[in-house]
Amino acid sequence: MVKEKSSLYDKLPLELLAGFYYEINKNIEKGILSNAMYHEIRLMEQTALRKGISLEYLHDMGSRIIQAEKLLREKTMQH
């Protein structure tokens, strides 16, 4: 069995990894980030799979985290 090299993403907390994964995917879809970012996405996906986390879960968790941060920012700006 070939051991995969670890990446910076292996050291990140799950919440941060999920947030990055979601935001980078969203920005690639919008055309804001280049297709070169797919390499970063693959590294994140490898990390998730090594940790036994499905990509759907990673995406959903990232979406929830980003939404919660947006709501928090809106509330703090209102006060």
Image: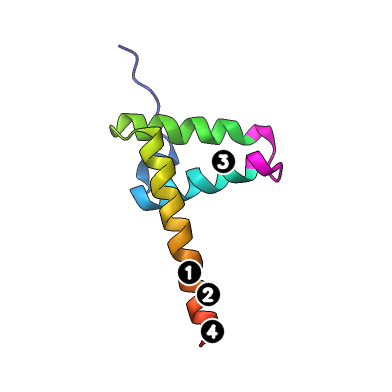
Coordinates of residue 74 in the picture (x, y in percent): 53, 74
Q: Nearer the viewer, mark 3 or mark 1?
A: 1
Per the rendering, the mark at residue 25 is 3
Coordinates of residue 24 in the picture (x, y in percent): 57, 44
Instruction: Name the residue beneath numbered marker 1.
Output: 71
Query: Is tag 4's residue or tag 1's residue first in the polypeptide sequence?
Result: 1
Instruction: Identify the amino acid type marked 3.
Output: Asn
Nearest to the observer: residue 33 or residue 30: 30
Query: Is tag 3's residue or tag 1's residue first in the polypeptide sequence?
Result: 3
Query: Is tag 3's residue or tag 4's residue first in the polypeptide sequence?
Result: 3
Q: Is residue 20 above or below residue 65?
A: above
- Mark 3 lies on a secondary structure that is helix
Magenta highlight range:
28-36
- Mark 4 lies on a secondary structure that is helix
Instruction: Identify the amino acid type marked 2.
Output: Glu
- Mark 2 lies on a secondary structure that is helix
Per the rendering, the mark at residue 22 is none
